[in-house]
Amino acid sequence: GKAGYDHFMAKEINEQPRSLRQGLSERVDELAGEVDIGDLAYLNPRGVQLVACGTSYHAAVYGAQLFRDAGVPAQAFLAHEYASAPPPVGDDLVIGVTQSGETADTLSALRAARSKGATTLAVTNVVASTAARECDHVFYIKAGPEIGVAATKTFASQLTALNLLATGMVPTKDDRESIAALRDLPADVQEVLDESQAEAVAETYLDSDAYFFLGRGLQYPVALEGALKMKEITYKHAEGFAAGELKHGPLALVTANTPVFAMVTGDGEQARKTIGNVKEVEARDAPVVAVTDGQSDVERYADHVLSVPESPPRTAAVLTNVQLQLAAYHTAAKLGRPIDKPRNLAKSVTVE
Ligand code: M6R
C-alpha cells in the first residue's frame, strides 16, 4: 500500500534514504576508499555509450559526464536516436539505463550495439528483466518496486549506481571525497525531506505560466529531470535548460509569471556562472527559486531558497533533485492531478 501517504509518488520520494542505502550496501568500502562493483571493475572500456529514454536518459547524461571526468570518452544517447550514433567499436561499452528493463526503444538500441560487437551492460531495477537477460552484464540499482508512473526513487538510485560504476571502472584521485559522500547520502536526503520548503514554494507559484529549471555540469540533467517531473504530473509547461544556454534563446520566454528554479551548489566556477544566469532572469522580473547548499551568494538574488546539505558534485545532484521532486509533487497535489497515473502515460513503454 501507500504506507499512509496520499500517493505512491509521495511514498517513493520519502523512501529514498532507504532505497539508496539498499543500493549502496556492500558496494562501498570506505576504509579502503574504494567501491565494490564486482567483476565490472575489470571491464576497462575504451569508450562508453549510454542509451536510455525519459528520466533514465537524464541519468545517462549524468553518467556520461562522470566517465568523461575520469578521462573515458562517453556520450549519452536517446535510445530512439541511437541509429544516428557513431557505431561502437571494439572495447566500447554500451550501457542501457532502464528502470524497468523492458523499454522497447532501449532494448532495440542495446540489441543494435550488441550486433555490432559492443559489450553491453544493463543498469536496471528489475531482476531478470529483458535488459538484464539480454545484456552481457547487469548492475542492479536495488531501489525496490516503483509504482508511481513518475520515476523518483529509481532516478536517485540510477545516479548513484552510475556513480558507483564510473568510480569502480575508472578510479580517480577525487574518489575518496565522493565515496565518503556516498556514506552520508541517505542521511543527507533525509535532511532534505525533513526540512524542505518546497510545499510553500509550490503554493506560491501555482498559477504560473511555465516553470523553468537551470543547471550546469552535473546539475544540467537535474534541470532536465525537474522539468520532466513538473510537466508529467502537473500538466504545466516546464522546461529544463543548461544554464549557459539561456541567453541563446530561452530567455525570451522568461517573465514575471515564470518561476525559475536554479540549482547552484558549491562555490566554484560553475556556481559563479550559474549565478550570472540567475541575475539575467532576475532582471526580467522572474521569481527565482535557488536550490542551493548555501556555499555561494546565490541566495541574495533568490526569492525563495530550497536548501540542501553540502556535498561534492556527484551526490549534490541527488540532493537538489529531491527538492525538485517535492516541488513537482506539491504543485500537482494542489492542482488536484491524478499524480500516480498521469494522463496518456504508462509506467513501462514496451512499443517503439
Ligand atoms: O523503464 P525505463 O527506465 O526504461 O523507462 C524510461 C522512461 O519511460 C521513464 O524513465 C519515464 O520517462 C519516467 N517514468 C518518467 O517519470
Image: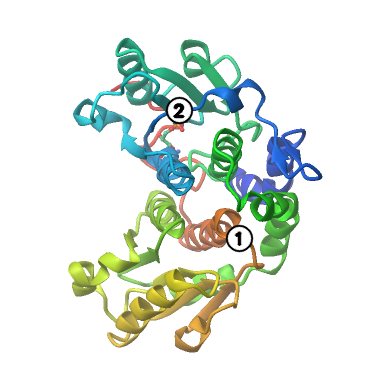
Mark 2 secondary-structure assignment? loop
Q: In the figure, is residue 155 to the left or right of 186?
A: left
Work out how far the residue at label 2 is from the one at label 1, CA to CA, in angstroms. Answer: 25 Å
Quadrant of res 259: bottom left
Give the residue pinned by disc 1: 312
CB contact under 8 Å: marks 2 and 1: no
Q: Where is residue 65 in the image (x, y as percent from the top left)?
A: 43, 47
Residue located 30% across and 88% down the image: 283
The C terminus: image quadrant: top left
The N terminus: image quadrant: top right
Disc number lying in front (2 or 1): 2
Q: Does residue 279 lie above or below 79 as drawn? A: below
Give the residue pinned by disc 2: 45
- First in sequence: mark 2 or mark 1? 2
Where residue 117 is drawn, which disc sits there?
none
Q: Does residue 206 lie above or below 138 as drawn? A: below
Q: In the figure, is residue 330 to the left or right of 28?
A: left
Quadrant of res 58: top left
Q: Position of residue 347 (x, y in %)?
A: 46, 32
Ligand 1 quadrant assignment: top left
Q: Where is residue 159 in the image (x, y as percent from the top left)?
A: 54, 44
Q: Which amino acid does label 2 sit on?
A: Pro
Mark 1 secondary-structure assignment? loop
Please rate how many residues cluster around mark 1, counting C-alpha atoms within 10 Å: few if below 14, some from 14 to 19, many from 20.
Answer: some
- Establish whether ligand 1 lies closer than 8 Å to the Cβ of label 2: no
Residue located 57% across and 35% down the image: 165
Residue located 30% across and 23% down the image: 88
Q: Does residue 335 lie above or below 204 as drawn? A: above
Q: Which amino acid does label 1 sit on?
A: Pro
Of 256 and 298, which appears nearest the observer?
Answer: 298
Of 203 and 252, which appears nearest the observer?
Answer: 252
Q: In the figure, is residue 202 to the left or right of 345?
A: right
